[in-house]
Image (tube, helix red, strand yellow):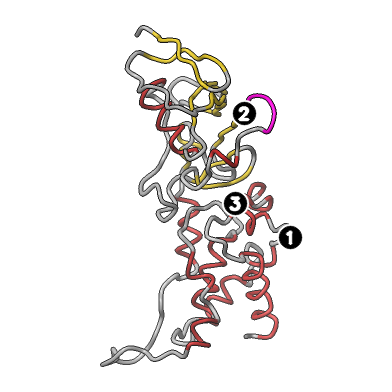
Amino acid sequence: MTAATTTANNGTVDLPEDAPPVPEGATIVTVKIERYNPEADEDMRWDTFRVPALPTDRVLNLLHYIKWYLDGTLTFRRSCAHGVCGSDAMRINGHNRLACKVLMRDMFAKKGETTLTVEPIKGLPVEKDLVVDMEPFFESYKAIKPYLVTSGNDPTHERIQSVAERERFDDTTKCILCAACTSSCPVYWSDNQYFGPASIVNAHRFIFDSRDEAAEERLDILNDMDGVWRCRTTFNCTDACPRGIQVTKAIQEVKRALMFRR
């Protein structure tokens, strides 16, 4: 396809003829993406693209631009594009982030050209480009019984809980299972038998729920060589969480619950 030379704030760039006009105020950004095609590649490789970006764009917009106009084979997950579904977790400039939440105005270099590096999250098998196999992550999640466990007859009305009882585990209800925290953990990189931060966070959500009756069972599950004691308190998980959950604090509270049985 014939390329057209387009001028932006910081120079010119060759874009496909079917690409939309570069909007006023756009800056050309170099995007380096670590890629892998299981049908053609033996190892990971890097591809580089030059893309126009506005300060209000998010990294996900740049990935869409690349896929729609520059290389349709680029593969990544995304769904809601509003930081709720957790589909588009990836490493952006070396940090685990949701591509739909990272604004380009926060990524522009103060001097010189802006370069973004985008990689798949670590610790999970890469299926293609930025898509990883999430099954090991969800197996750990399912193992901690992430659902309310009660006994007796079904209640005839809602289970009453005080404001203070709800606040006890409010923070950990925010998890969207994006795996950003778990895949930022050095322990998980080296041994993915470790349950990982996300599973422990979701166990915390039920261990401290006054309505639940399986807290002791979950604590026994996590009191394992691959459970909470593997945490080294590096705080990578807290930094990576797009929902602002105090992940490391939650893990420490589960450890304390094990020591003192809540």
Tag in front: 1 or 3: 1
| Tag 3 and tag 2, C-beta contact below 8 Å | no
Tag in front: 2 or 1: 2
Is 13 inside the magenta-drawn segment?
A: no
Q: Position of residue 74 (x, y in %)?
A: 42, 27
Q: Nearer the viewer, residue 200 or 161?
A: 161
Q: Position of residue 89 (x, y in %)?
A: 50, 46
- Residue at numbered disc 2: 114
- Residue at numbered disc 1: 232
Of label 1 and label 3, which has the lower sequence position? 3
Badge 3 crowding class, 10 Å Cα cut-off, few under 14, some 14 to 19, many 20 or more, is some
Q: In which quarter of the image is the C terminus?
A: bottom right
Which amino acid type corresponds to the residue marked 1 in the rendered image?
Arg
Which residue is situated farthest in the top direction here?
A: 2
Secondary structure state at the residue bearing disc 3: loop
Q: What stretch is highlighted in magenta?
A: 110-115
Of label 2 and label 1, which has the lower sequence position? 2
Which amino acid type corresponds to the residue marked 2 in the rendered image?
Thr
Vertical order, 96 against 156 (above or below) = above
| Tag 2 and tag 1, C-beta contact below 8 Å | no
Hey, which quadrant is residue 111 in on the image?
top right
Hey, which quadrant is residue 241 in on the image?
bottom right
Left or right, 107 with respect to 209, comes to right
- Residue at numbered disc 3: 192
